[in-house]
Image (cartoon, rainbow, N blue to C red):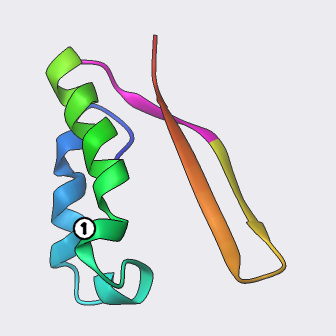
Amino acid sequence: MAEGANPGRIIEALDRPDANLSVPTPEHFLLVAYIAGLAEAADSPLRTFVAGCEMVSLSMRSLVLAA
């Protein structure tokens, strides 16, 4: 949802009924909101830099501004 032409729409993820399962409290979400806002202001899409899952339960995604 953060990737693509409208990264600012990432905030809509908090409205999903299952959002509390992946983002237990809003402050867990702030880092993605910051880069999504930066991308929106720069009119630059985001792309995934690193994505993966370790030991079945720990996952992380890193986003970068596309050039």
Tell which of 25 and 43 is nearer to you: 25
Query: Depth check: 62 or 43 in front?
Result: 62
Task: Please tell me how crowded label 1 is: few (under 14), some (14-19), or many (20+) other residues with Cα within 10 Å.
Answer: some
Say what amino acid the circle numbered 1 marks. Ala
The residue range painted magenta reads 43-49
The structure residue drawn at horizontal position 25% and vertical position 54%, both measured from the top left corner, is 10
Residue at the spot 78% in from the left edge and 82% down from the top edge: 56
What is the quadrant of residue 4 in the picture? top left
Say which quarter of the image contains residue 50.
Answer: top right
Q: In x, y percent, where is residue 35?
A: 33, 37
Against 31, is 41 above or below?
above
* Image location (x, y in percent) of residue 37: 20, 36
**Left or right position of 40 against 54:** left
Disc tally is 1
Q: In what element is the residue under mark 1?
A: helix
Instruction: Confirm whether residue 54 shows in the render.
Output: yes
Is residue 1 visible in the rendered image? The answer is: no
Residue drawn 39% across the image and 41% down it? 3
Residue 4 horizontal side relative to residue 6, left or right: right
User: Residue 18 at what x, y percent from top left?
Assistant: 32, 88
Please identify the quarter of the rendering in which residue 20 is found: bottom left
Residue receiving disc 1: 13
User: In this rendering, is residue 10 above or below 63?
Assistant: below
Q: Residue at x 26, y 49 (%)?
A: 33
Q: Is residue 2 magenta?
A: no
Q: Residue furthest front?
A: 27
